[in-house]
Amino acid sequence: MIDPEAVYRQTTPRSRALHERAAKAMPGGTTRTTTYFDPYPVYIERGEGCRVWDADGVERIDMIGNYTAMILGHSHPKIVEAIRAQAARGTGFAAANPLEVELAELLCKRVPSLDAVRFCNSGTEATMFAMRLARAFTGRPKIARMEGGYHGTHDYAEVSTHPAAGEGGPAEEPEAVADSLGTPAWAIEEVVVLPFNHPDAAERIIRREGSALAAVIVEPIIGAGGVIAATPEFLGRLREVTRELGILLIFDEVISFRVAPGGAQQMYGVTPDLTTLGKIIGGGLPVAAFGGRADVMQLLDPRNKPNIPQGGTYNGNPLGMAAGLAGMKELTPDVYDDLNRKGARVCEQLAEVFASHHVPVQVNGAGSMLALHFTDTPVVDYRTMAAADKKKTRDLFLSLLNHGVLMAPRAMGALSTPMDEDDLQRCVDAVDASVAELVPRWEAS
Ligand SMILES: Cc1ncc(COP(=O)(O)O)c(C=O)c1O
C-alpha cells in the first residue's frame, strides 16, 4: 500500500534540507502559513508557463499558480519584458508615476462598480481599507462577513474564516469566532457573521444589526474557502437589503476577478458599492486595489479635510504597475472564455474520474478555478465544506505532488493560459492514478 507522505519524503530531499535550515530562522521554517504543509513545504526554484521545478529538479504542472494570481502562467514574455524595462528605469520613487494612472483607468473601465480606485500591496490591505472606508462613510462600527469567507489577515478579517466544528454556533445564526491568537476582543464584537448562500437567514441578521452595520463584505465566489459560488438569489438579496438599510456592499474579488473581464460582478450582473482586487492585477507582483462609488472614494481625497490617509511606500510602485498593465492587457474577453471553457471541461473529467473509482467527491468549479471536496453532500456553504474528509484531501494533495501536479494543500486548483489540452489531461490522469493508489489505503483505514 502506497503512503504518499513517504514517497514525498523520498523524492524531495532538498526541500527537506531547506526546511530544516529555514526552521532555525523562521518559525516553523516558513514565512507564509498558506504554503506550509506537513511534513514540510515544497521549495520551488523556477517556473515557466504552467510548469514549476522544485529544489530537487522535479518538474510539475502548476495547478494553483500562486493561489490563482498567475493567470498567465510563469515568466510570461510580455510581463518579463515590462518588468525588465521598468527595473532599468527605476523601481520606486517618492512620487506618482504615469503607469499607475494607466492601470487605474483600465480597471475603472473594466469593472462595473469602479468609479475610482486606489492601489495597495496585498488583498489584506485592500479589504482593510474597504472596511475602513465603509465605517467612515456610514459612521457605523460593524462589518458583516460570511462564515468561511477569506479576506486576508488583518484584525477585522480574522474572524470565522474556519471555525472548528461545534464552535461556530447554529448554522443559520453563526457566532463570531477568532481565527488567530491575538485577535482583539473588539473584533469579535464588531464583526457580524452571516451564513453564505442562506438569503433568508442572512437578511434576518442584517436587519437585526442594520443600524450598526457599515458594510457587508462577501466573495461572490468564495475562493480559498473551497470555490463556492454564491447563488444569484443570495447576491441579489444582499444587494437589496444593504441598499435599503444604507449599508455598503463590498465584493471581495481578490480571487473571483479572474472569472470575467469585469469580475464576478459582471458575470452575476450585481454591482456592489466597493470592490477589492488583488492577485491577477499585478502580473504576479504584489499589487492589490480597492475602489468603488465616487462619493465613497472621495473620502480618500487629500484635498478634502478631513480625509482617510492611505500611505504606503509601495502603493502604485512602478514595477508592479508595469507588470500589472502588461498582464491585464493580455487578458482579453476571448482569453477568459477559453480559460473558463477549459475549467468546466476539467471539472467534468475529474467528476468522471472520481465516479469511476466510486469515491464520493464534490468537484466545485467556477470559471477557471476548482476545488475537490471529499463528501457526498453538495458543498454550498462553510458547514458543508467543513464536513468533508480532510484526511483524504491531504492524501490526494501529497499524491498529486508525487504524480507531478501542484495544487493548493486544500485541493484547490486554478488554470493558467499556457495550459493546453495535454497539460490538462496530464492533471486528470494524475488524479486518476492518485485515487487508484489511495483507494486501498482509504479502504484499510
Ligand atoms: C478573497 C480574498 N481576499 C483577500 C485575500 C488576501 O490577499 P493577500 O494574500 O494578498 O493579503 C485573499 C487571499 O487569498 C483572498 O482570497
Image (spheres, rainbow, N blue to C red):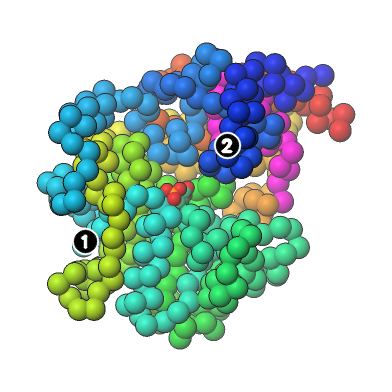
The amino acid on which the numbered mark 1 sits, given as a three-letter code, is Ala
Q: Nearer the viewer, mark 2 or mark 1?
A: 2
- Determine the CA span between mark 2 and mark 1: 42 Å
Q: Which of the two discs, 2 and 1, labels the residue nearer the N terminus?
A: 2
> Which residue is rendered at x = 45% and y = 65% of the image?
217
Judge the density around disc 2: few (<14), some (14-19), many (≥20) Cα neighbours within 10 Å.
few
The amino acid on which the numbered mark 2 sits, given as a three-letter code, is Ala
The front one of 62 and 124 is: 124
How far from the left and from the top, in percent, is residue 32? 53, 42
Q: Quadrant of the N terminus?
A: top right
User: Going by the picture, which residue comes out furthest to the front?
Assistant: 24
How far from the left and from the top, in percent, is residue 407? 55, 32
Using the rendered image of the protein, determine whether residue 269 is visible from the camera's viewpoint. no
> Which residue is rendered at x = 27% and y = 68% of the image?
309
Residue tagged 1: 116
The image quadrant of residue 322 is top left
How far from the left and from the top, in percent, is residue 144? 50, 71
Using the rendered image of the protein, determine whether residue 18 is visible from the camera's viewpoint. yes
- Residue 102 inside the magenta-drawn segment: no
User: Going by the picture, which residue comes out furthest to the right?
Assistant: 444
Residue tagged 2: 25
Instruction: Magenta stretch: give its range.
Output: 387-411
How far from the left and from the top, in percent, is residue 445? 86, 33
User: Going by the picture, which residue comes out furthest to the top?
Assistant: 57
Q: Secondary structure at mark 2?
A: helix
Q: Secondary structure at mark 1?
A: strand
The front one of 134 and 308 is: 308
The image quadrant of residue 116 is bottom left
> Which residue is rendered at x = 21% and y = 55% of the image?
108
Judge the density around disc 1: few (<14), some (14-19), many (≥20) Cα neighbours within 10 Å.
many
> Which residue is rendered at x = 58% and y = 65% of the image?
183
